[in-house]
Image: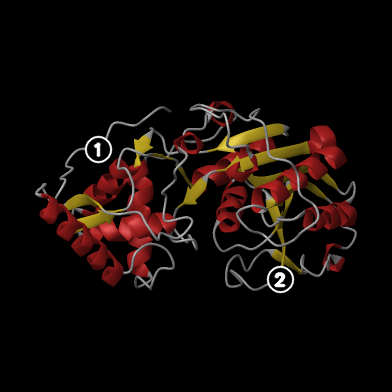
Amino acid sequence: MRILVLGGTSFVGRAIVEDALRSGAEVTLFGRGRTGVELFPELTRLIGDRDTGDYGALGEDSWDAVVDVSGYVPRHVGQAMDALGDRVGRYLFLSSHAVYQREGVGPGSDEDTPRRRPVRDTEELTEATYGPCKVACEDDVLARYGARATIVRAGKVAGPHDTADTFTYWVRRAARGGRVALPADPGQPVQVIDSRDLARLVVQLLVDDRPGAFHAVGPAEPVTLGGLIETCARVAGSRIELVRVPDDDLPLFFPLVRDDWATQQRSPARARAAGLPATPLEVTAADVLAWDRARGEPPLTAGFTPEEERARLARRDGSQSSEGRPVLARHTEPHTAVGC
């Protein structure tokens, strides 16, 4: 099978390429040549720029499938499809759970959940526009390729080489041990998918030439945020005490913290039936911990800095002490997951 990957190879794209190569596929990379340039020296790299609409390097070649990991606005997808035309067999678009409506959605929602209204009049990606732009991209791929279109809606992706730092933050913080400031309910459900599981699903869908939309969510067993942090500590061999701290003045997406719990309880059933693996959370955490340590644990872009965490803990301690209540809430066993 000949596969064209549109996008960089820093994280998700890297995992997909690695899995495709293990399956025996012939892979061609298309991108700006700025990320992962040292990887996969044996592969053909076509240099172009989706922001400027430069697809000239695609030439007249053909592929059995294209995997679009870097299409964020309708123009990106439309221009890629115009450039490729019928020179690809299947178009797999990597989408997001941000496409879904948030009102009236309960635990266990599937891929037929109503989506948000598509947006096509902006390329400024914000909390309000990211999901609707992805909806428009999905619609355009389906309109152009029909039964040759596949949509994979990924949840939060975790694993080695993650550039977002959200899962890595809790892995590193748990490994450090001690009192861990948690600005959320520890019973909040959370879904993270190992990047290698996502990659395996993508490649399997291409091998099977399977159309449709699929949730890429994990881990293997339902878990809460408190349970996830405790799992990370157990893997690292550290001891922690989760301390609930005020959640005021948090950034919009503090690592893995979500107010709408149903968005963290989506059903993976369709994807599991199509071949989505289920890597245990312990394995993902251990691999991220080893990778983070090997790279020297550089500063993270998400979560509390040590100084911010100390300040939150001190403020919480002062408030609780003045009210005469216990300062610390100790958690030694994983929390019971809510829903599935």
279 versus 4 height, above or below: above
- Front residue of 268/291: it is 268
320 versus 185 height, above or below: below
Residue at x 36% of width, y 39% of height: 188
Residue at x 44% of width, y 53% of height: 159
| Quadrant of the rendering where the C terminus is positioned | top left
Q: Which residue is mark 2?
A: 32
Query: In screen coordinates, is 125 left or right of 326?
Result: right
Residue at disc 1, secondary structure: loop
Instruction: State the image quarter where residue 145 is shown.
Output: top right
Q: Residue 79 location in percent, x, y?
A: 85, 57
Residue at x 22% of width, y 62% of height: 315
Q: Is residue 110 visible?
A: yes
Amino acid residing under circle 1:
Pro
| Quadrant of the rendering where the N terminus is positioned | top right
**Distance (Cα) linking label 2 and label 1:** 43 Å
